[in-house]
Image (tube, rainbow, N blue to C red):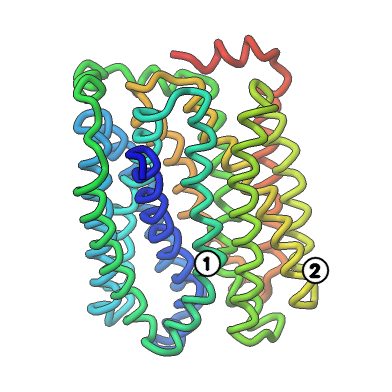
Amino acid sequence: MKPRALMIFLLFVGYVIVYIDKTVMGFALLPIEREFNLPAEQLGYVTGVFFLAYSLFQIPAGWLNDRFGFKKVLCASLLLLGGFALCFGLLGFGLGLLVTFRFLSGMGHSGYPCSCAKAVVANFPLEQRTFAQSILLSSAGLAMTAGPLVAVYCLEHIGWRGSFSALGLLAFAVAACVLWLVPNPPRAAQRSADGAGNTYRTLLKTPIVLLLFVAIFCINIPSYGLMAWLPKFLVQQRGMALGMSSLVVAAGGLGIWISSLGTGWLVGRYMQGREPLVIFCCSLLSALCIWLVYTSTSAWGASVLLFLGYVFLMASFVTVFTLPMKRLAPEVMGAAMGLINTGGTLGGFVAPIVMGYLITLSQGYASTFIFLALAMVVSGLVMLPLAVKPRQSLLNGGEL
């Protein structure tokens, strides 16, 4: 296997573990709720605090990438998330410990997305970056297609504690493979970060970075909100068996997988310079499908609508996430992706907590699905200032 293909394969496997960790949590909330008798808002904190840490450490992780190189941060990230997944499974004997270990696990996760983006920019030419990154992001589809089925099987046979412990050991194994097989980044790319004291101030003044920050914040609200609460909704409100709910969620994962790869190819080949319009249209279509998931009363209907909702949601996400790779300089890519992905992780922090409170206050899920759909609408609307600009203006506005 060629070095770049091997690198993408290993990073893909690592991404699968990252996403499975998030996917399993949505199903693990059910046995955790029964074991500790936790109300919905406290379950929201168990999920949401993970994204709080994810958000807080995104920018430091981006700086570490620019300063020390992506390989070191990749290995550290996998080791941390694996270690705290083990702690969550083996030592999580109360709400305080559960929240603490998920917070620390989020700290470990924070280094992975920006490290992968940095690795893609360092190893692929401009015209290949969108597709390479879309392959990595398609790991979310695999995790959500196979993840629910694996999660239900593991929860039934080894429990939620054993499931997280096994996940931690897998993360350790992938970290060892990355350390051994992934090439070191060019030294020049690491040294370029030494004089980057003004990088963050410059990025914060760049309109594209700020708008993408808001867009990915809104996109990740339904992305992680559904991941955290959809299994409980399907089981408790639609009367589905846990196994059937896993098949519905897996249909959404299939949509993510197909959309990730398809969007990377289509946008990279045919929509260069028109990415904001892609985000706008796909966000509105996703909002419609998300609301229709709530109105559907059958597993088949929910599966189809969730599949379509995630197709359009992931099209928006991939386009947002890959746009900086075509507009910003490689030496600031870690910082830029850290800033932008902070918006996404903040969305992941806000969504499960807000949804927990909405469910408690309304004693139902209608308000939560309205909240998720409106977030997607906003993610599309914030792209309009970029969508109305001519292509050349967009290109100039995104460069440092």
The quadrant where residue 335 appears: top left
Mark 2 element type? helix
Q: Position of residue 59 (x, y in %)?
A: 33, 37
Task: Estimate how packed mark 2 is, as few (under 14), some (14 to 19) or many (20 or more) residues with alpha carbons within 10 Å.
Answer: few
Q: Position of residue 116 (x, y in %)?
A: 37, 41
Task: Estimate how packed mark 1 is, as few (under 14), some (14 to 19) or many (20 or more) residues with alpha carbons within 10 Å.
Answer: many
Residue at image location 40% in from the left, 44% down from the top: 8
**Foreground pick, 86 / 117:** 117
The dot on residue 7 is none
Tell me the distance, in whole angstroms, between the alpha carbons under discs 2 and 1. Answer: 19 Å
Mark 1 element type? helix
The quadrant where residue 371 appears: bottom right
Whether residue 353 is visible to the viewer of this picture, yes or no, is: no
Callout 2 touching callout 1 (CB < 8 Å)? no
Whether residue 390 is visible to the viewer of this picture, yes or no, is: yes
Q: Position of residue 77 (x, y in %)?
A: 27, 51
Residue at image location 45% in from the left, 59% down from the top: 19
On screen, residue 203 above or below 57: above
The residue carrying mark 1 is: 228
Residue at image location 31% in from the left, 35% down from the top: 62
The amino acid marked with disc number 1 is: Ala
- In-image side of 259 versus 161 (left or right): right
The residue carrying mark 2 is: 295
Q: Earlier in the sequence, mark 2 or mark 1?
A: 1
The amino acid marked with disc number 2 is: Thr
